[in-house]
Image (tube, grey):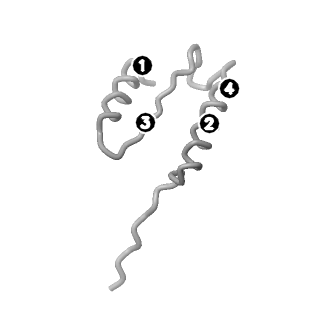
Amino acid sequence: MVPEPSVEKLANKLKLQKNIVIDYQLVKGANHFFKDHMDNMVGSVTGYLDQRMGQGLSTPRRKAAAQG
């Protein structure tokens, strides 16, 4: 497990890079299994997926392999 301040530091560092979208949300009081906080976690994930799917960015596209 990684301490929350380390995760926040990484998220902030990644936000500075081009073409990377980071949506970092802390679920206060949640442990590794989100015990007693599952509804908050599911709501955050659902909101994120709805937003990304609406932008047409939900799945990365792979380049087709070159045929030779």
- Give the distance between the C-alpha atoms of the residues marked 2 and 1, in whole angstroms: 25 Å
- Element class at badge 3: loop
User: Disc 1 versus disc 4: distance between alpha carbons?
Assistant: 20 Å
Identify residue type, mark 4. Met
* Residue at image coords 62%, 36%: 47
Q: Mark 2 points at which residue?
A: 47
Locate residue 59, reporting x and y percent: 52, 54
Q: What is the C-alpha distance between the residues marked 2 and 4?
A: 14 Å
Mark 1 surroundings within 10 Å by alpha-carbon count, few (fewer than 14), some (14 through 19), many (20 or more): few
Mark 1 highlights which residue?
3
Q: Element at badge 1?
A: loop
Residue bearing the label numbered 3: 22
Q: Nearer the viewer, mark 2 or mark 4?
A: 2
Give how far across and how far down residue 35 sits, in percent: 66, 21
Disc 2 or 1, which lies upstream in sequence?
1
Q: Alpha carbon of mark 2 to alpha carbon of mark 3: how far? A: 14 Å
Q: Residue at x 37, y 43 (%)?
A: 20
Distance from Cα at disc 3 to Cα at disc 4: 21 Å
Between 26 and 34, the residue placed more toward the observer is: 26
The residue nearer to you, when weighing 62 against 34, is 62
